[in-house]
Image (cartoon, grey):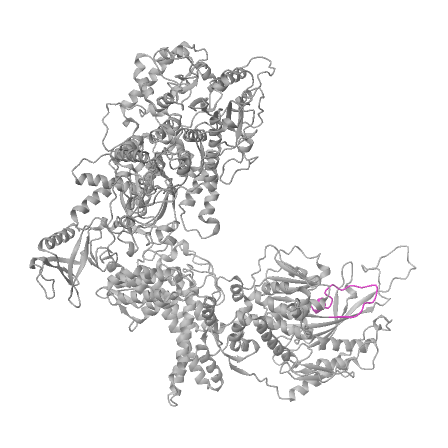
C-alpha cells in the first residue's frame, strides 16, 4: 500500500521578483507543510511547473497538464503532475516595469492592457498514475472555476490521505468528496513497466529504424535528447524508451522535461536521456556527442563522431521483421491478388504490448543462458554474485561483437546482475521466457509466422498484467464547462485553509496507526536456470570443432609420452602441435593430461617433462589474456602437478617453464579463476551438510551431484529464516574461512606463475606488459590489465618505482592488489585481510629460495641436443667472415614452403645456422618438422645484392623466445626471416649486421668480392688504398700520359661550358685532372686523322681498341673500319672517329665512335656541349636492308632545345654561339639523313612522302610463333608523340597488333628524334626540317626504383596476406612493373617499325645511359638476329651497356658513396623485356631462359668484374679493360662472366635453347600488352634444397661428386622413384628435359665403351644435320614423334609447335602438332629415340641420399615376438641415426636407433629363428642404453662393413 499523492503544491507567479528578464515562480502553499519521513519534498519544483519559464501573457490560455520526473539523491523518481491555468493580474500591481509592457511617455491617460499570470496545481507522488493525477487536478480546477459547492480543503485532504495498493492486479475505487468516482487498476506484477499506449505512439512518431538506433544508443550509454513542442509527448517518449529496455533499468540522468533555465545540463559528460521543448532548439550549443530525436518531425540526427553499435545479426533483421509484422500486418499480403479480409492492425493499446513483446523476445535471445555464467561467491549473510562475462561471450561466439560487449560492460547490466542474479527471489515474465521459452525461440527462428504467434502470446501476458479485469466501474469526473477559462473571474484561486487540510491528514494518519501493517506477500521461488547457451551453438554448428582424427592424434601422442614410447610420440608431435590450434584439441589435451595426475602430483622423466611442457606452451600461446576458451584455467592446476626431479630434494614443476604468456599477468583472469574455485568450494560445503542430513533418508547421491551452485545457494536462502542465530553465524564463519583459504591458495598460485625461474630477471617489469589498471570488478570490465602487476594495493596509478623495484616487491604488490580486490568483494574480515598481507612477503621469499635451488640444478642438466650445424659448400676463393650463428629460418609470405595450397611437407621453419662469407649470406639447416627433417634447407644470396635489413618484433615460440629477429632482403628476390637462438648474444647479432653492411658497401669498388676473391678475410674486411695492384696503377698513368701527348699541350684549354658532373664515385682520384681537359674548337682536321693520332707508343693501346666488342660489331655492320693508312674510302657514309680515344670529350662514352663521314671531329666537340653529360649523338646500328641507322645520345640541355628547333630562315640580329651550335647540329642530322640511299640525291624537303604499302611488307612477324602472314607495320599517325604519351590511343587488335596496315602518313621524315616530352614541352616543329621530333612520356629511374621495391614485396612478401588489398595480384598491379615493361616494348617496336621502313631514329632520352640504353638494346635485339645468339647477345651487352657507360656501380649502389642513391635495376628491366620476347619467340633465340636468369643474378652478385664500375674510362683507370695477356689466370677463378659462360657452355648445354631454329632476316615484333606478359619466374622461384642455381659449381659440381660416391658405396640400383617438392627441389635437375637426358646418357654410354666422350654441341649439330639430310631425302616433314625441329620449317608449321618452358637447366622438348605426319613413325636416329613415360618416371632419385652415409639390407630380430624380418637400413652420419624401412622404396621410417645411445657394436651369435644358410660371422649385436638389437647381414663381409661404418660414426661423434 502507498499514498496516491505525497504532496499538493500551489505554485504561482512571483510578482515581487519580476524585472527586465524572465519571471520566476514561487510556492504559494504546500500540503502537508511537514515533510514525510519516508519521502522528503523535492526542491526546485517551481522550475518544472513552467519548463519554458514564468512569463506574463496578454491573453488567457487554455489550461494544460504535464508530468515531470524528478530523481532524488537516492535514485528514487518523483512524478510531478502539473496542472497550469492563467489568472488575471490585479490592476493595482504596477505594470510598466515588466518586459511584456511597452511604456510610452505620451500615453499617460491610455489604460494599460490586461495581463495574465500562470498558476500551477502540482501533485507529487512516487506512483506513476498519469490519468488519475489529471482527473484529480482537473476536478480541483473545476470546483474553482465553476464555483461548485464543494470545499477545496476537503477534496485536497481526501486526495492526500488516499491509500492504494501498488501491485496485485486489484481495482480500487476512490472518491475525493466532490461527487466523483475513479477506478485505479494496479498491475499484477509491478516489476513490469506500465506503458498504456506510449510505446506504440513512440514507434508511430519515429519509425522502426530510428527507434532501434535510439534503443541501441541507450543500451550502449550514449547521450539522447528528445525534441517536441508537447511536454507530455516528451514524457511519454522517455517512458517508452525505458520500457523497451526492460529487463534492464536505466541508471543515468533521466529528465523527460528539462526546464529552459537548466539547459546547461546538456553539456554533462555522463550519458543521459533528456527531453526539451522544440522552441529551445536554437538556444542549444553545438552538441557534438548528443543524439537528437525530433518527435514531431520523426527524425534522429546522429553526429559523425558517434558510432552506435548495432544489434548483432541475425537479431537485427529478425527484430526489424517482427516490428514490421506488428505495425503493418497488411504488408505481408499487400501483393496478394486476394488478400485476407479480416486483416487489420491491433488497437493502440494492444499494439503497444506487441511492440514491447518484440523487444522482450529480443532480450531473451541476447541473454539466453546468462544464469550459467553467474558465479556465487557468498550465500550468507547476503548473496554475493558475479557475472563471468568472458565465459558468456565465448559460449555465444560473440567475443568480437561490439554491441553485446558494451551492453555487458554497462551500468544497466550491472544492476541487472545485482537485481536478478539471486537464485531465490520472485520471478517475472522475463525469467519465464529465459527459463522455459528458449527452446521454442530457437525452434521458431526463420519462421516469421511462428515468431509472430509467440509475440502475440507474450503481448497478451503484458496486457493482462496492466488490465487483469474488464473495467466494470465507470469513471465519474466533473469537468469545467466549455470556455470557462475565458470568463472574467471575480477572484484568483483562493487561499486554502491549511489547518483544515492538516486536520484531514492527521485523522487519516491516526486511523492508519490502529490498522495492523499490511505485509506484502513475496512469492519467492528458486529461479530456474534455463538451457545453457552452448546447446544452441552446437546445434547451429557455429563452433568449428576439430575432426575426430585430430583428437585421436592428441590422445595417441599423450599416451605414447606416458608409456615412454618417445619415438612414436616424436613422430606425432608436429601433427599434434598443429591440431592444438583448434579449441576442441586444446580442451582434449587438458582432459587427457588430467587423467595422468595422481593425488595432485605426476613425476615425469626429463624427456616426458619436455614434451608435456612443449604441449602446454603450444596450447597457451594462442590464448588471449582473457582466456575466453578456459584453456589456461584448466591448465592452471596441471602446471602445479607435473614435475621432474632434478636432484636430491629438488623438484622442478611445469609452472616454471610456462610463464611466458600474458594470461598469467592479467588480473581479470585470476579474479575469474578465484571466484570459480570459491563457488566450487561453497557448493561443496553445503552439499556436504545436506549429505549429512540425507544419509538417514537414503537419498541418491546422483541427485546431489546434479545440483548447480546456484541451486544449492537457492535452497540455503530458502532455509535461512528457519535457522537459529547460532546456526546462521556458524554458516557465515564457514563461508568466510572458505574464501580466506582460497585467497591463501591463490596467493601461492600467483607466486608460482609470476616469479621467474631466474629471479634476477623480472619478467613483470617489461615495458610491453605494463598497462592501465581499473579498480572495478572483473565482472563488467574487460580491458586488458596485463602487466599492471607491481601496483600496491593502496595506490591507483600503478607502480611508480618499476625501474628500481626488484622481483619480490613487484610480485608482492601484484598479489596484494589481487587479494584486496577479491577479499573485499567476498566479505572477508579486515583481520583476516591484514593477516594475509602480512604473510605474503614470507610466501614469496620462501618460493624465491626454492627457485634458486631449482635454477641451480637445472643448469647442471645436460644441454638439449640441438641439430648439428651443417657447413655450407663454398666457391674457390670464397672465405667465411663469420662462423655459423645458430638461428631459426622462419616462414615468410610464400606459402609453398609451408605446404600451403600446393601441398607437400612443411619445410619452414628450419633450424640451422647463418653464415657470412666474402661472397654470400647463407642459411643451412634442417626443417623443424619431423616428417621433413631428412631434408637440407639452404637459402642464400650474394652480399652485394643485399638491400635492406630490419629488426622484427619478438614472437613467442612454443619452445622458447629467441632474443633477436632480423629480416634480410635481397635484390635477387630473396628474403630471410631469421630468429637467433638464445645462445647467440645480442652483441654477436650486432656484429653480424655490421659485417654485412661493411661487405655490402665497401669504401672502394676494388674492395668487392670480384677483386678480393682469394684474399684473406682480414684483407677483405680492412682494405687499404695502397694495396691496389701496382701494375694497374702504372698502366693507368701511362694511358693518361699518352692522352696528353696525343692531344698536344697546345690544344689544352679550360672548358668554356661545364656539363653536369657525374656523382662522386668511391675510386682513387688520380685521374681527376682530366675533368678539366678539353679539345680546343680550332683543332685542325689533320690533327685528328688516323695517321697523326696513332703513334708508335700507342700501337698496343690501339690493338686493344680494335679488339673491343663495339669495333667488331661496327665492322660486321659495315659502319667503318679502323686502319693505319689514309686510304680509307671517302664513299663510306660513316667513319670511326677517335676523338674520344682518351675520353677527353665524354667520359662515359667508348673510345671509338661512329659518326657521319662529312662531320669533323672538332664539330663533334662543340656539339657535345649541347647534350647532357656530353653524350652527343652517335650511330650504334645500321639496318642492312633499308640502310637506316639507329643513333643514341643523351637529352639536350634546357637552353639547347630552343636553338635546336629554330628555323633556318628566321631573322636573327647576328651570329651567336647558340646559333652556330644549332647550325652544326642541323648539319650533323642532315648528314645522317643524307647517308641513306633514299635521301642522298633528293633535294628540298623530303619527308618520305612516296612510301606506299608496298614498302611496308617486311620479313618480320607479330607475336611469337603463332602467326606469320600478317602485315608488320606499327601504328604511327601524324603525331606519334601524342599517341605514345597516352593522349590518343589507336584501336589495336585483340592480340596487341595494329588495326590497320595503311597507317603511315604519306609524308614521312628521314630522321625521327625520340625525346622526353617534358624536355621538349613548348617546342614547335619547323616544317622545313627533314627530321621530326617525337616527344614521349617515359618513366624515370625513381619510378623504376619504387616499382622494383613494390615488385619485391609482391613476389617475396614478408608475411602471408590477410586482406584483399594485400594479395599477390593486387600488389603486382600496384608495382607498375609490367606497365613499365609495356612502355619499353611499345617504344622499341615503334622504333623497329621506323627503321624497317627506311627512317633513321635518334633515341635522345634522359642522360642517355638508362632508358636510352634499354630502348636501343631492345631495338637491335628485335631487328638483328645476330644479337639473339649467345655471342651476339654478349656483344650487344658489352657494346650498349658496358662501353656506352650504363652506371652499373651507381645504379647498383656498389660502394659506400652510392649507398644513398639506392638500388635501381635498369639492366634487370631490360632482361625482363628480353624474357617476355623470348616467351613469344622461343625459336628465335640461341640462348635459354636460364641464360637470362644467370645474367640477372650475377650482374648484382659481384662475383665477376664484368658489371662493375660505370664506364670504360673507370675500368681503364683500374686496369680492368686490358688485362695483360701474360697474366696467369687461376683455373677456377674467372674475372669475366663471359669467360665463365664460354667455359660452361662447352661442358654442358645449360645455356643452349634446343628450340633454336631462326629464319634469316627475321624482325620480331612482340605484343606489348600487359595481358600478353607473364611474371618472370626468376622473381618467384626458389630451390631450398641447394640455394640459387646460378653458381654452377655449388649445385651441379656437388651433385656429380655425390652421385659418384653413391655408386661406389651402395649396391642400390641407379634409378628409383623420387618425390619432387615445390619450392624445394630443382625440378630441371631432378627431372631434366628429354634432349638433355639423352645427351647425358650418350656420354655415359661412350664412357662405358671406353671411348672419349664427345662434346655435346658437336653431337647435337651432327644429329641435327643428319636428321635434316634424311628429311630432305624423304621429301617430307619430320614425323610427329621427332625430337628436333628443323629451321627449314614453314611459318605455318612453326606456329603449331608446342614448346615447354625451361626453368634452370637445359631446354625443352619440342613436339609438332602437325596432324599430317604419322603418329607411329620412329626417329631416324636410334640413339635419340624417345623413352616411354614409365622409363622417364624411373629416373627419379631421392634427395635423402645426402644423408645416407651407408645403406643396405639387414635382418633384424623383433623385440617382442623375437621374429627375424628383412629391413632396409640407412646409416645417417649427419643426424647420427640408424633408420630402417620396410623396403628401399619405402619413405615411411619404421624405427630409429639414436647413435648417441649406442654403447657397443660386437659380433653376435646364431639365434633361434635366424635366416638359414647364413654363416655365424654375419651376425652382430648393437647395444644401446635401452636394449640390445640383433642384426644379421647377408654375409660376413657385409656384417664387417656395417660394424666398421657404425663404429666410424661413433668415433666421429
Q: Is residue 1577 above or below residue 10?
A: above
Q: Is residue 1220 above or below residue 1002?
A: above
Left/right of residue 172 with respect to residue 1287 in the rendered view? right
Asked if residue 841 can be seen in this view, the reply is: no
Answer yes or no: is residue 1719 visible. Answer: yes
Magenta stretch bounds: 44-65
What is the residue that sits farthest to the right in this orientation?
109
The location of residue 299, given as percent across then percent down, is 67, 60
The image quarter containing residue 1408 is top left
Quarter occupied by residue 67 = bottom right
Residue at (55% x, 37% y) in the render = 1291
Q: Position of residue 464 (x, y in %)?
A: 63, 80
| Image quadrant where one finds the N terminus | bottom right
**Residue lying at the far front of the rendered structure:** 1674
Residue 558: percent from left, percent from top: 29, 66
- Indicate whether 613 appears above or below 1658: below
Q: Quadrant of residue 114?
A: bottom right
Point out the residue furthest to the left here.
1816
Q: Nearer the viewer, residue 139 or 605?
A: 605
> At which x and y percent is residue 1409?
43, 28
The reply, left or right, for residue 1401 in relation to residue 1796 is right
Is residue 58 in the magenta section? yes
Residue at 71% over, 56% down: 282
**Image point (59%, 60%), residue name:** 269
- Taking the magenta stretch, the answer to whether it contains residue 1473 is no
Q: Nearer the viewer, residue 924 or 6?
A: 924
**Looking at the picture, does residue 192 appear above or below residue 1474?**
below
Q: Which residue is more in the foreground, 1749 or 916?
A: 1749
Magenta: main secondary structure equals: loop
| Number of marks | 0
Amino acid at each position: 500500500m502507498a499514498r496516491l499523492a505525497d504532496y499538493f503544491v500551489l505554485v504561482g507567479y512571483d510578482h515581487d521578483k519580476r524585472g527586465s528578464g524572465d519571471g520566476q515562480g514561487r510556492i504559494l502553499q504546500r500540503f502537508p507543510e511537514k515533510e514525510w519521513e519516508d519521502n522528503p519534498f523535492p526542491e526546485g519544483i517551481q522550475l518544472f511547473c513552467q519548463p519554458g519559464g514564468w512569463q506574463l501573457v496578454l491573453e488567457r490560455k487554455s489550461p494544460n497538464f504535464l508530468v515531470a520526473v524528478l530523481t532524488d539523491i537516492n535514485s528514487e523518481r518523483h512524478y510531478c503532475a502539473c496542472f497550469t491555468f492563467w489568472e488575471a493580474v490585479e490592476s493595482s500591481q504596477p505594470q510598466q516595469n515588466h518586459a511584456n509592457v511597452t511604456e510610452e511617455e505620451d500615453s499617460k491617460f491610455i489604460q494599460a492592457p490586461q495581463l495574465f499570470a500562470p498558476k500551477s496545481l502540482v501533485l507529487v507522488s512516487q506512483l506513476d498514475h498519469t490519468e488519475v493525477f489529471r482527473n484529480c487536478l482537473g476536478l480541483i480546477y473545476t470546483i474553482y472555476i465553476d464555483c461548485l459547492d464543494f470545499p477545496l480543503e476537503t477534496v485536497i485532504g481526501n486526495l492526500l490521505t488516499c491509500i492504494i495498493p501498488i501491485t496485485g492486479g486489484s481495482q480500487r475505487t476512490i472518491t475525493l468528496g466532490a461527487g466523483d468516482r475513479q477506478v485505479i487498476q494496479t498491475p499484477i506484477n509491478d516489476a513490469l513497466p506500465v506503458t498504456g499506449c506510449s510505446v506504440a505512439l513512440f514507434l508511430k512518431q519515429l519509425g522502426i529504424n530510428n527507434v532501434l538506433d535510439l534503443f541501441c544508443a541507450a543500451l550502449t550509454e550514449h547521450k539522447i535528447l528528445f525534441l517536441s513542442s508537447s511536454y507530455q509527448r516528451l514524457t511519454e517518449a522517455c517512458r517508452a524508451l525505458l520500457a523497451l529496455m526492460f529487463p534492464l533499468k536505466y541508471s543515468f540522468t533521466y529528465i523527460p522535461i528539462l526546464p529552459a533555465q537548466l539547459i546547461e545540463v546538456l553539456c554533462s559528460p555522463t550519458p543521459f536521456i533528456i527531453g526539451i521543448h522544440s522552441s529551445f532548439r536554437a538556444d542549444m550549443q553545438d552538441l557534438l556527442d548528443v543524439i537528437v530525436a525530433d518527435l514531431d518531425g520523426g527524425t534522429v540526427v546522429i553526429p559523425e563522431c558517434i558510432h552506435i553499435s548495432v544489434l548483432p545479426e541475425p537479431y537485427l533483421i529478425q527484430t526489424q521483421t517482427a516490428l514490421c509484422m506488428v505495425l503493418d500486418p497488411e504488408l505481408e499480403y499487400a501483393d496478394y491478388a486476394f488478400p485476407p479480409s479480416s486483416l487489420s492492425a491491433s488497437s493502440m493499446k494492444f499494439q503497444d504490448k506487441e511492440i514491447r513483446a518484440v523487444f522482450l523476445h529480443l532480450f531473451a535471445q541476447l541473454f539466453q543462458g546468462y544464469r550459467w555464467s553467474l558465479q556465487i561467491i557468498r550465500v550468507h549473510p547476503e548473496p554475493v554474485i558475479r557475472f563471468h562475462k568472458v565465459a558468456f561471450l565465448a559460449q555465444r561466439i560473440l567475443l568480437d561483437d561490439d554491441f553485446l560487449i558494451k551492453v555487458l560492460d554497462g551500468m544497466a547490466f550491472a544492476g541487472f546482475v545485482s537485481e536478478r542474479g539471486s537464485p531465490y527471489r520472485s520471478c517475472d515474465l522475463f525469467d519465464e521466457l529465459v527459463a522455459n521459452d528458449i527452446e521454442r525461440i530457437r525452434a521458431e527462428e526463420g519462421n516469421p509466422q511462428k515468431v509472430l504467434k509467440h509475440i502475440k502470446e507474450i503481448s497478451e501476458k503484458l496486457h493482462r498484467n496492466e488490465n487483469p479485469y474488464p473495467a466494470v466501474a465507470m469513471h465519474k469526473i466533473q469537468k469545467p464547462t466549455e470556455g470557462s477559462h475565458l470568463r472574467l473571474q471575480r477572484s484568483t484561486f483562493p487561499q486554502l485553509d491549511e489547518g483544515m487540510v492538516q486536520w484531514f491528514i492527521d485523522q487519516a494518519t491516526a486511523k492508519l496507526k490502529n490498522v495492523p501493517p499490511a505485509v506484502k506477500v513475496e512469492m519467492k521461488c528458486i529461479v530456474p536456470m534455463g538451457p545453457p547457451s552452448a546447446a544452441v551453438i552446437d546445434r547451429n554448428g557455429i563452433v568449428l570443432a576439430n575432426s575426430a582424427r585430430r583428437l585421436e592424434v592428441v590422445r595417441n601422442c599423450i599416451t605414447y609420452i606416458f608409456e615412454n614410447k618417445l619415438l612414436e610420440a616424436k613422430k606425432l608431435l608436429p601433427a599434434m602441435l598443429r591440431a592444438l590450434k583448434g579449441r576442441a584439441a586444446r580442451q582434449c589435451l587438458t582432459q587427457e593430461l588430467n587423467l595422468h595426475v595422481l593425488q595432485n602430483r605426476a613425476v615425469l622423466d626429463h624427456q616426458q617433462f619436455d614434451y608435456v611442457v612443449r604441449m602446454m606452451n603450444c596450447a597457451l600461446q594462442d590464448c588471449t589474456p582473457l582466456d575466453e576458451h578456459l584453456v589456461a584455467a584448466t591448465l592452471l592446476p596441471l602446471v602445479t602437478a607435473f614435475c621432474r626431479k632434478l636432484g636430491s630434494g629438488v623438484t622442478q614443476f611445469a609452472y616454471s617453464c610456462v610463464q611466458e604468456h600474458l594470461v598469467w599477468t592479467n588480473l581479470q583472469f585470476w579474479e575469474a579463476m578465484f571466484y570459480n574455485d570459491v563457488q566450487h568450494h561453497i557448493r561443496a560445503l553445503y552439499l556436504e551438510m545436506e549429505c549429512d542430513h540425507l544419509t538417514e533418508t537414503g537419498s541418491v547421491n546422483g541427485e546431489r551431484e546434479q545440483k548447480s551452485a546456484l541451486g544449492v545457494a537457492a535452497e540455503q536462502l530458502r532455509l535461512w529464516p528457519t535457522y537459529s542465530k547460532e546456526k546462521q553465524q556458524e554458516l557465515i564463519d564457514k563461508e568466510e574461512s572458505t574464501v580466506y583459504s582460497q585467497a591463501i591458495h591463490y596467493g601461492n598460485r600467483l607466486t608460482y606463475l609470476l616469479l621467474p625461474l631466474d629471479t634476477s630477471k623480472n619478467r613483470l617489469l617489461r615495458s610491453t606488459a605494463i598497462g592501465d589498471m581499473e579498480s572495478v570488478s572483473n565482472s563488467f570490465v574487460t580491458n586488458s590489465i596485463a602487466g599492471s602487476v607491481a601496483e600496491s594495493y593502496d595506490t591507483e596509478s600503478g607502480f611508480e618505482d618499476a625501474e628500481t623495484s626488484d622481483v619480490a616487491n613487484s610480485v608482492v604488490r601484484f598479489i596484494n592488489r589481487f587479494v584486496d580486490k577479491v577479499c573485499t568483494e567476498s566479505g572477508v574480515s579486515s583481520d583476516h585481510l591484514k593477516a594475509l598481507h602480512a604473510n605474503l612477503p614470507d610466501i614469496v621469499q620462501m618460493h624465491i629460495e626454492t627457485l634458486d635451488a631449482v635454477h641451480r640444478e637445472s643448469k647442471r642438466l645436460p644441454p638439449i641436443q640441438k641439430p648439428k650445424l651443417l657447413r655450407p659448400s663454398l666457391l674457390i676463393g670464397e672465405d667465411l667472415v663469420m662462423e655459423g650463428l645458430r638461428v631459426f629460418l622462419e616462414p615468410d609470405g610464400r606459402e609453398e614452403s609451408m605446404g600451403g595450397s600446393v601441398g607437400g611437407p612443411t619445410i619452414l621453419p628450419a633450424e640451422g645456422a647463418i653464415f657470412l662469407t666474402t661472397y654470400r649470406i647463407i642459411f643451412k639447416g634442417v626443417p623443424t618438422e619431423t616428417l621433413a627433417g631428412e631434408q637440407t634447407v639452404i637459402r642464400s644470396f650474394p652480399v652485394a645484392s643485399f638491400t635492406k635489413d630490419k629488426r622484427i618484433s619478438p614472437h613467442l615460440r612454443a619452445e622458447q623466445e629467441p632474443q633477436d629477429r632480423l629480416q634480410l632482403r635481397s635484390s635477387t628476390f630473396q628474403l630471410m626471416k631469421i630468429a637467433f637462438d638464445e645462445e647467440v648474444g645480442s652483441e654477436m647479432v650486432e656484429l653480424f649486421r655490421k659485417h654485412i653492411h661493411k661487405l655490402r658497401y665497401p669504401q672502394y669498388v676494388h674492395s668487392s668480392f670480384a677483386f678480393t676473391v682469394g684474399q684473406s678475410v682480414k684483407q677483405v674486411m680492412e682494405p687499404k688504398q695502397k694495396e691496389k695492384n701496382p701494375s694497374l696503377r702504372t698502366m693507368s698513368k701511362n694511358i693518361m700520359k699518352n692522352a696528353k701527348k696525343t692531344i698536344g699541350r697546345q690544344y689544352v684549354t679550360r672548358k668554356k661550358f661545364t656539363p653536369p658532373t657525374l656523382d662522386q664515385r668511391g675510386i682513387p682520384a688520380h685521374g681527376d685532372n682530366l675533368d678539366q681537359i678539353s679539345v680546343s674548337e680550332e683543332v685542325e682536321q689533320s690533327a685528328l686523322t688516323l695517321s697523326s693520332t696513332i703513334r708508335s707508343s700507342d700501337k698496343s693501346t690501339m690493338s686493344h681498341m680494335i679488339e673491343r666488342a663495339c669495333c667488331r660489331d661496327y665492322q660486321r655492320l659495315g659502319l667503318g673500319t679502323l686502319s693505319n693508312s689514309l686510304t680509307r674510302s671517302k664513299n663510306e657514309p660513316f667513319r670511326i672517329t677517335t676523338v674520344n680515344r682518351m675520353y677527353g670529350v665524354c667520359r662515359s662514352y667508348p673510345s671509338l665512335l661512329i659518326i657521319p663521314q662529312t662531320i669533323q671531329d672538332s664539330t663533334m666537340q662543340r656539339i657535345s656541349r649541347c647534350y647532357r653529360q656530353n653524350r652527343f649523338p652517335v650511330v650504334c646500328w645500321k639496318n642492312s636492308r633499308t640502310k637506316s641507322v639507329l643513333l643514341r645520345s643523351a637529352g639536350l640541355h634546357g637552353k639547347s632545345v630552343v636553338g635546336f628547333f629554330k628555323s633556318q630562315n628566321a631573322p636573327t640580329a647576328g651570329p651567336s654561339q647558340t646559333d652556330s651550335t644549332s647550325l652544326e647540329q642541323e648539319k650533323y642530322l642532315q648528314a645522317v639523313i643524307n647517308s641513306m640511299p633514299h635521301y642522298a640525291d633528293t633535294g628540298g624537303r623530303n619527308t618520305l612522302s612516296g612510301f606506299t604499302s608496298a614498302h611496308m611488307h617486311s620479313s618480320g612477324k607479330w607475336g611469337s610463333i603463332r602467326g606469320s602472314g600478317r602485315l608488320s607495320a606499327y601504328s604511327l599517325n601524324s603525331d606519334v608523340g601524342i599517341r605514345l604519351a597516352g593522349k590518343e590511343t589507336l584501336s589495336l587488335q585483340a592480340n596487341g597488333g595494329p588495326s590497320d596496315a595503311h597507317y603511315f602518313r604519306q609524308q614521312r621524315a628521314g630522321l625521327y628524334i625520340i625525346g622526353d616530352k617534358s624536355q621538349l614541352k613548348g617546342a614547335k616543329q619547323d616544317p622545313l626540317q627533314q627530321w621530326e621530333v617525337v616527344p614521349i612520356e617515359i618513366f624515370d629511374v625513381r619510378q623504376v626504383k619504387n616499382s622494383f621495391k613494390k615488385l619485391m614485396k609482391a613476389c617475396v612478401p614478408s608475411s602471408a596476406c590477410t586482406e584483399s588489398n594485400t594479395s599477390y595480384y593486387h600488389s603486382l598491379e600496384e608495382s607498375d612493373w609490367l606497365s613499365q615493361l609495356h612502355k619499353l616494348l611499345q617504344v622499341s617496336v615503334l622504333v623497329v617499325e621506323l627503321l624497317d621502313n627506311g627512317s633513321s631514329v635518334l633515341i635522345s632520352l634522359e642522360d642517355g645511359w638508362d632508358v636510352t640504353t634499354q630502348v636501343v638494346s631492345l631495338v637491335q635485339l628485335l631487328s638483328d638476329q645476330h644479337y639473339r645468339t649467345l655471342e651476339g647477345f654478349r656483344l650487344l651487352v658489352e657494346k650498349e651497356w658496358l662501353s656506352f657507360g650504363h652506371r652499373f656501380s651507381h645504379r647498383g649502389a656498389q660502394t659506400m658513396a652510392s649507398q644513398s642513391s639506392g638500388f635501381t635495376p635498369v639492366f634487370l628491366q631490360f632482361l625482363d623485356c628480353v624474357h617476355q620476347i623470348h616467351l613469344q619467340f622461343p625459336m628465335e633465340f640461341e640462348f635459354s631462359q636460364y641464360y637470362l636468369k644467370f645474367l640477372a643474378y650475377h650482374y648484382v652478385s659481384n662475383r665477376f668484374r664484368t658489371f662493375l664500375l660505370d664506364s670504360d674510362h673507370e675500368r681503364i683507370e683500374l686496369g680492368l679493360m686490358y688485362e695483360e695477356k701474360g697474366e696467369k689466370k687461376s683455373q677456377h677463378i674467372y674475372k669475366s662472366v663471359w669467360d665463365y659462360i664460354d667455359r660452361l657452355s662447352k661442358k654442358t648445354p645449360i645455356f643452349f635453347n634446343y628450340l633454336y631454329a631462326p629464319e634469316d632476316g627475321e624482325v620480331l615484333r612482340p605484343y606489348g600488352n600487359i595481358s600478353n606478359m607473364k611474371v618472370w619466374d626468376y622473381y618467384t622461384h626458389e630451390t631450398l634444397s641447394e640455394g640459387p642455381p646460378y653458381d654452377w659449381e655449388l649445385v651441379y659440381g656437388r651433385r656429380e661428386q655425390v652421385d659418384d660416391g653413391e655408386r661406389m658405396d651402395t649396391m642400390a640400383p641407379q634409378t628409383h622413384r623420387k618425390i619432387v617438392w615445390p619450392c624445394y627441389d630443382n625440378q630441371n635437375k631432378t627431372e631434366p628435359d628429354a634432349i638433355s637426358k639423352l645427351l647425358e646418357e650418350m656420354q655415359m654410354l661412350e664412357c662405358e665403351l671406353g671411348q672419349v666422350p664427345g662434346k655435346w654441341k658437336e653431337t647435337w649439330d651432327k644429329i641435327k644435320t643428319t636428321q635434316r639430310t634424311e628429311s630432305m631425302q624423304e621429301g617430307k616433314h619430320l614425323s610427329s614423334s621427332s625430337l628436333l625441329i628443323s629451321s627449314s620449317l614453314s611459318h605455318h608449321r612453326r606456329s603449331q609447335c608446342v614448346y615447354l618452358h625451361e626453368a634452370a637447366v637445359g631446354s625443352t622438348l619440342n613436339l609438332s602438332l602437325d596432324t599430317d605426319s604419322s603418329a607411329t613413325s620412329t626417329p631416324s636416329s636410334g640413339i635419340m629415340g624417345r623413352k616411354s613415360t614409365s622409363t622417364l618416371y624411373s629416373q627419379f632419385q631421392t634427395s635423402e641420399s645426402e644423408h645416407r652415409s651407408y645403406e643396405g639390407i639387414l635382418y633384424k630380430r623383433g623385440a617382442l615376438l623375437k621374429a627375424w624380418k628383412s629391413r632396409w637400413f640407412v646409416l645417417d652420419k649427419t643426424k647420427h641415426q640408424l633408420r630402417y624401412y620396410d623396403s628401399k622404396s619405402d619413405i615411411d621410417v619404421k624405427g630409429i636407433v639414436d647413435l648417441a645411445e649406442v654403447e657397443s657394436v660386437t659380433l653376435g651369435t646364431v639365434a633361434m629363428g635366424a635366416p638359414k644358410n647364413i654363416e655365424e660371422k654375419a651376425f652382430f649385436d648393437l647395444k644401446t642404453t635401452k636394449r640390445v638389437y640383433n642384426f644379421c647381414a647377408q654375409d660376413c663381409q657385409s656384417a664387417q662393413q656395417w660394424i666398421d661404418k657404425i663404429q666410424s660414426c661413433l668415433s666421429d661423434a
